[in-house]
Image (cartoon, rainbow, N blue to C red):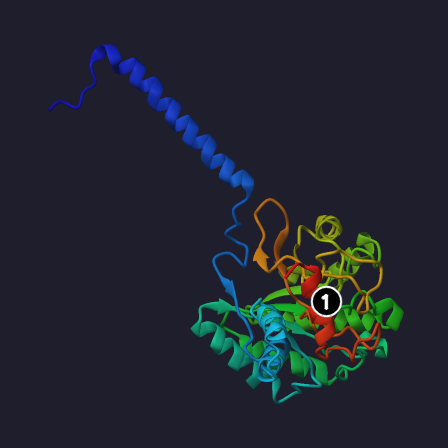
Amino acid sequence: MSNVLPRVGLGVAIVAIAGVLATMVVGVGSIFAQGGVAADNPFAGTSFYVDPGSKAQTAADAAAESGDDADAATFGRIAQVPTAIWLTPEKHPVGEVGGYVSGLAAAAKKLGQTPVFTVYGVPNRDCGNFSGGGLSAEQYPVWVQEIADALSGGPAVIILEPDALALADECGNVDERLGEIGSAVDSLAGAGLVVYIDAGHSNWGPAAEMADLLNRAGVERARGFATNVSNYNATDLEQAYAEQISAQTGGAHYVIDTSRNGNGSDGQWCNPPGRALGAEPAASPSGSAQDANLWVKPPGESDGTCNGGPAAGEWWNAGALELAADAGW
């Protein structure tokens, strides 16, 4: 059988085929316009690791053991959302932190997943307030290097030192803090890890001031920066703030903590009532400098002894239940 079209219908066929191809091109173009995840996004094609030893999971197990099925279900659902694993020298000191993170990295690797860690041990952390502590200037780079060595060679994401740059002026140690963060970036990024330096949040200070601090800390050697960590600001406000910073830091990429911003902020930062769980972690579509929404601050862990909460970082049943209920869980 001949595959040649009849002469009379050839022109019509060509026009029809061209129309189909044009439709296909428009369709593909609209897919890209809607924003597939960019190939160079470190969260593209991967899933996030869930820590089976999280405080949320421990609370779920305790509630189940006591027969409180409703609370167990809520805490268990929170526990199943991938959340950053916080590394502090108080819990995992020099000589121990490496073994801890390498164990988690190995577990994540078996599942083909990427763990997210928050490194939180800078000297004079939180200016000695609710989350005060941290290491000495001599111990800090040793501790960070131990983390870097333990995670080297495998995929891992680091959120580096929440509030450290934003508090530097208040703590009175800007130059020291910039050096500490820059050195940590070199150690962690040098090990092949994806590093985001904390950049405060949109209600803290001008984007230009934060961009200057990030530039001086070496953000160009990291993947970028993180905003809204442990805070409640609405995602659109954080995106606007982060885009301003990105424009002043050579196009640095960023991630936003959405763990507790479902109802936005009421201006308080310490266990404010009426807040809600936010959008779950996901890679961001292409078209902006944002790489992902992440849960960095674990929901249910207190900000400090305020508004009825326990000490910073401690699990708080009532707080977790309120965040979930206000999110419609």
Name the residue that disc number 1 marks: 322
Q: Position of residue 211 (x, y in %)?
A: 77, 56
Inspect this view and state whether residue 141 appears: yes
The C terminus, quarter of image = bottom right
Looking at the image, how many numbered discs can be counted on the residues? 1
Identity, as a three-letter code, of the amino acid under mark 1:
Glu
Residue depicted at x 70% and y 76%: 317
Residue depicted at x 74% and y 56%: 263
Q: Position of residue 214 (x, y in %)?
A: 74, 60
Question: Does residue 76 appear to the left or right of 31 in the view shown?
Answer: right
The N terminus, quarter of image = top left
Q: Is residue 241 above or below residue 109?
A: above
Q: Quadrant of residue 129?
A: bottom right
Q: Nearer the viewer, residue 278 or 171?
A: 278
Q: Quadrant of residue 315?
A: bottom right
Residue depicted at x 64% and y 64%: 295
Name the residue furthest left.
Answer: 1
**Classed neighbour count for the residue bearing mark 1: other residues with Cα under 10 Å, few (<14), some (14–19), many (≥20):** some
Q: Nearer the viewer, residue 263 or 166?
A: 263
Q: Position of residue 37 (x, y in %)?
A: 53, 50
Q: Position of residue 240 (x, y in %)?
A: 74, 48
Q: Nearer the viewer, residue 291 or 276?
A: 276
Inspect this view and state whether residue 161 appears: no
Question: Does residue 30 appear to the left or right of 197 in the view shown?
Answer: left
Q: Quadrant of residue 175?
A: bottom right
SS type, badge 1: helix
Name the residue furthest top.
Answer: 8
